[in-house]
Amino acid sequence: MPRPAYSSPYVWWSWFTGKKPDLDKLDETDTYGRLYSRKSSSATVMRADDADLLGSADSGLLGRADSGPMSKSSAEEKDPETRAKIAAAKMMGILKAKEKFRVSFDTGLYGAAVVIPQIARSAGWPRNLSVLSIRSFIFLCVNYTAQGAILYMIAKEENVWDLFAGQMYLCDFGRDANGCPDGPDCIGPGGTVFAPPRVYSWDMWTTRMYVRDSLVALFPHMKDEIHKNVDPGEYGVESYWCRLLCCTLFTVTVMSDLWGSINIVRVLVDIPNKAEYWIDYEVPEWADKDHAKAIHGWSELDLVALKIAGMSLHWKILNVVVILIPKLLLWKVTAEAGITFLMETSGIEDIVVNSVALAFILQIDELLCEALMSDTTRAILEKIEDYHLEDYDKEIAVESMTDEELLHRYEAQRTGFGLADLWDTFPVKLCFVFLLTCWFVSLYYARHCVTSPTGGQVSHSMRLPLGTHFTFFNAFFQHFAPVETQDEPFWTMPNVAP
């Protein structure tokens, strides 16, 4: 007779005995009655002391259990308000401990490069796991190449091709156009006074400048008249605050990748510096294995446990050099390039679209993992257990506390508002986003802008590069390996010394 699908304990009981029990007449003192009686509020919960009874029932021993009818727990006897307080204390105690001391490992290419080799090592390097380990590093190299190539091209566009196009840095051109001509910083890169109808993007402004200069070249004797009647406008930003908002939202989108790197650091620091087993075969002790599989609908795969454990020091060093440092470097360069790209975008629509599109660079690893990695590798990554840091058991003491102790702690928390509560109220991640945004925006101003006599930020003098040669170090370490440029500037800010 085929085994039925797990839908109800009574289906299994019918399969074992060939009879369908009368649920309304089932005695709660029977073994299965204690476990599955409809009258019990714990109908779907198996207590630890019921495991042996279940085993005896499976072998046909359906006699009375020694214990009497199931009694209500102490929580069930309390009033709804008390039960709500107990539930809140348990919920927040457990969730706060998990938030602080439980680490969810990366399930993308970086996680695969860390986890798969350790599982293979624990199993003695079998051929199939060794192949998966090598493959995980191949995909990691593909990811590095793809992300690095995109970032290299963006850096070359900003540091080489934009200069050959004659583009100066946007900085804060046009920020105070609404207050012009009487306000500060009203002089644009073309040397004329800003006005809202005269603010254009770079492409539009250069096109209008080209038309005016072409007319002057064709009719040099009409130069003054052409300059009077043909107005190319000025190059400036349409909305300064929209640009800052989109920079902040871009920082939010790249934060998840940074938290993934921080989690890798936390795990590598916390686990022991010795080789431990990351894979185990856990057979239940409360019942026979086949019986436990039948009760829960388990397969042999469900008995395989994958967990984060100790790692030898040389493996830790390898993971730091091959995985962690490149991951952090790519994040830093992506964040800098993204903020610079957004700060150089003048149109509101372009800023909004680019703020979303740039985050794609850091999602390439997830795309490759989803599209190219095998189902086996993804299943292993999904099966890996979350890692609990050293103080997790101490923080999750709520599991062993009685209801009375929980109520006492709950009432104590209502009596005052201390520094710890104030710190919990403080949105740390949000403030971290603001700090990072301010840092990268300030870095943009420091590298590309100077302060005008009226206090605004304008582009520094622009010089053409000596050629199109652009190396990896120019792209990823611009502070230490800047692009070589000519001595004479091709553009200087009007009324500002070069």
Image (cartoon, helix red, strand yellow):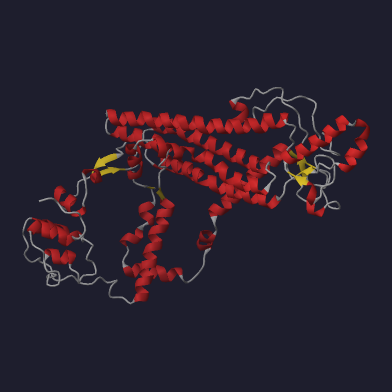
Judged left or right of residue 52, residue 468 is: right
Residue at figure coordinates x 20%, y 59% from the top left: 48
Q: Position of residue 497 (x, y in %)?
A: 84, 35
Judged left or right of residue 335, residue 15 is: left
Q: Position of residue 86 (x, y in %)?
A: 36, 69
Judged left or right of residue 390, residue 144 is: right
Q: Does residue 478 appear in this view?
A: no
Pick the front one: 77 or 108: 108
Q: Quadrant of residue 12?
A: bottom left
Q: How many marks?
A: 0
**Above or below — where is 227 with respect to 388?**
above
Residue at figure coordinates x 66%, y 33% from the top left: 158
**Above or below — where is 240 with respect to 24?**
above
Q: Quadrant of residue 308?
A: top left
Q: Position of residue 392 (x, y in %)?
A: 38, 52
Classify the position of the C terminus by image quarter: top right
Q: Position of residue 439 (x, y in %)?
A: 64, 44
Q: Does residue 358 appear in this view?
A: yes
Q: Quadrant of residue 471?
A: top right
Residue situated furthest bottom in the rendering? 79
Residue at figure coordinates x 29%, y 38% from the top left: 277
Judged left or right of residue 408, residue 185 is: right
